[in-house]
Image (spheres, rainbow, N blue to C red):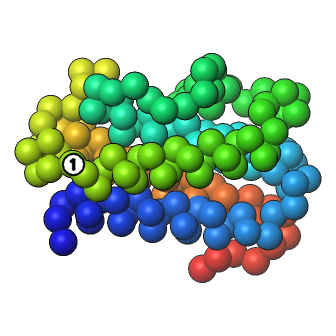
Amino acid sequence: MTWSEYLAAQLDRARRISLRAMDDFTEDDFYKKFDNINPGIWVLGHMSNSIPSIVFTALGEPVPLPPDWSKWFAIGTKVLDGLHQYPSLTEIRKVLNEGHQLTQQRVIKLSDQELLAPSDPKMQVIPWLKTVRDAICLAVIHESNHGGQLNWLRKLLGKPGLI
């Protein structure tokens, strides 16, 4: 297995765990607010934005997201008071799936030389994020973090935990 195959598999594994966490969410579940935790609609939208953004930005390539998508869901954005101001759950799921597929397709094609190339300077604000491979590792960690948030939402919604 090559590094690119391994990293693509890790991205996919983290995504499948995140998706499993919300398998039985109703649409209303995504819009419920709890103190000190992001609502499901934002977490899902953020995942649709952050993983392609991290990977494609590290490569210095255009991020394959709808225009203005990041204004709602980029790292550091504040959750809106009116959750129904976000794109629809259907649209967010569509962007989440398309972004994941495009990211997977791009990562799996990377050579070892491309993986070890310096990440785009925009990504190097994080001291340890020096290579494209480092950025893809960050994407896996980031996805896993939000999978954990979705598991907390499950518990707050009265659903059993995944583990």
Query: Identity of the amino acid at label 1?
Result: Leu
- Residue 97 locus on image (x, y percent): 59, 51
Residue at the spot x=11%, y=51% of the render?
112
Q: Nearer the viewer, residue 67 or 31?
A: 67
Residue at the spot x=63%, y=63% of the render?
19
Tally the numbered discs: 1
- Locate the N terminus and report the quarter of the image it occupies: bottom left
- Residue 38 locus on image (x, y percent): 71, 43
- Locate the C terminus and report the quarter of the image it occupies: bottom right
Q: Could one spot residue 88 in this view of the protein?
A: yes
Image height of 106 relative to 151, above or below: above
Residue at the spot x=24%, y=21% of the render?
121
* Element type where label 1 sits in the image: loop
Q: Which residue is mark 1?
A: 110
Res. 7 image quadrant:
bottom left
Residue at the spot x=59%, y=62% of the render?
18
